[in-house]
Amino acid sequence: MVSRAQIGLALALGLLALVSTAEGGVLFSNLTRTLAVEATIQSTNSTTGVAHVGSDHLVVSWALNSSLADSGLDAKYVNVNIKLCYAPVSQTDRGWRKTNNDLHKDKTCGKGIGSQKYVPGGNTTNWRITKDVPGAIYFVRVYAVDADGVQLGFGQTTNAAKSSNLIEILPISGRHASIDVASAIFSVFSVGSLISFLGVEAIRMSVKVDIRVSQLPDWRSGFMPYEVFVRHSCCTFQLTSVRFRQSHILVAAIAEMDRKGGLFVWATCERS
C-alpha cells in the first residue's frame, strides 16, 4: 500500500521535473541549422579579422538557407535574435562562458547584438561594438524564435566545431595618444632634471672653498664690519662687505660667480 509520504514525494518530483522542463526545454542539439549568417568588420584602421571596441562595427547579415526555401521549416519563425558568442579558445578555464546543450543554461552567447522581424529573404544590422565587450575570440549566431521567444532554428558564422571564420575583438586600453605624449614629456623632463641635479652636486662636491674674513674698524652700534672673499679651484667669488656681531661671526652668504651666472655656493665661517 502506498503511503501519503510516498505520494507526496512523487508529486514533488513530478512538479520539479515540470519546472525544469519549462525553464530549459530547448536543447541546442535539437535545433536545425536553417539560417545562413555572415559578419564583417567595418573599420577604417583595423586589420582583417580584428575589431576594436567602442569604434568598430560588426555588419551582420542573415537569411533562410536557400536550399530550404520550400521546406516549410520556417513556418513558425517570427523573430530572430542576433548574438555575439565566445569561441572555444576564449572559453578555456572560464566557467562563466561555459557551453551547455540546454540553451537556458548555455553561456556561450552572452552578448545580444539585436533582434529583428523574421523574413525569409533575411536582413542586415550594423552594430557598433560596445565598450563593455571583453577582449576575446568570437563568432556570431542567430536564433530563429517563435512568438513566445522559443528557439526553433539557428545559423552562425563559423563551422560546427567553431574553429573557422572567427572574429577577434580587442578591449579598450584606457590610454590615449595625448596621455602617451604627456608621459613621454614628463619622463624626459624628469631625466633631464636628475642629470642636472647630479651634475651640480658633482661640481659642488669637487669645489674647495677658501674663505678670508678681514676686520674693518667700525665701532657703531656694537657691530664690526667684515669683508668676505671666497675662492675655489675654478672661479673667484666676491661678496660685498657685511656686518656681524663682534662676539660671534656667522658668515652665510650666496656667492655670485664672476664668469658665469647661475651657480650658487653657500660659504660659512664662524669667528669667536
Image: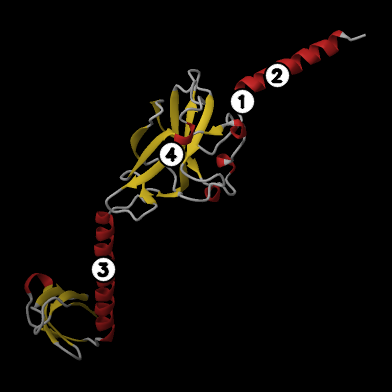
Judged from this view, the residue extending furthest toward the front is 70
Q: Look at discs 3 and 1 and give the one toward the viewer.
A: 1
Which amino acid is tagged 3?
Answer: Val
Q: Earlier in the sequence, mark 1 or mark 2?
A: 2
**148 in relation to 156, above or below:** above
Q: Earlier in the sequence, mark 3 or mark 1?
A: 1
Q: CA distance from mark 1 to mark 2?
A: 12 Å
Q: Position of residue 120 (x, y in %)?
A: 41, 28
**Residue beneath disc 1:** 24
Element assignment for label 3? helix
Q: Earlier in the sequence, mark 2 or mark 3?
A: 2
Tag 3–tag 1 contact (CB < 8 Å): no
Q: Which mark is residue 66?
A: none
Left or right placement of residue 197 versus residue 4 in this view: left
Residue in front for this viewpoint, 109 or 9: 109
**Residue beneath disc 3:** 188
Q: Position of residue 55 (x, y in %)?
A: 30, 45
**Residue beneath disc 2:** 16
Say which quarter of the image contains residue 132: top left
Q: CA distance from mark 4 to mark 3?
A: 52 Å
**17 in relation to 241, above or below:** above
Number of numbered discs on residues? 4
- CA neighbours of label 2 inside 10 A, class few (<14), some (14 to 19), many (20+): few
Q: Look at discs 4 and 3 and give the one toward the viewer.
A: 4
Q: Position of residue 244 (x, y in %)?
A: 15, 74
Q: Which mark is residue 37?
A: 4
- CA neighbours of label 4 inside 10 A, class few (<14), some (14 to 19), many (20+): many
Q: Earlier in the sequence, mark 4 or mark 2?
A: 2
- CA neighbours of label 1 inside 10 A, class few (<14), some (14 to 19), many (20+): some
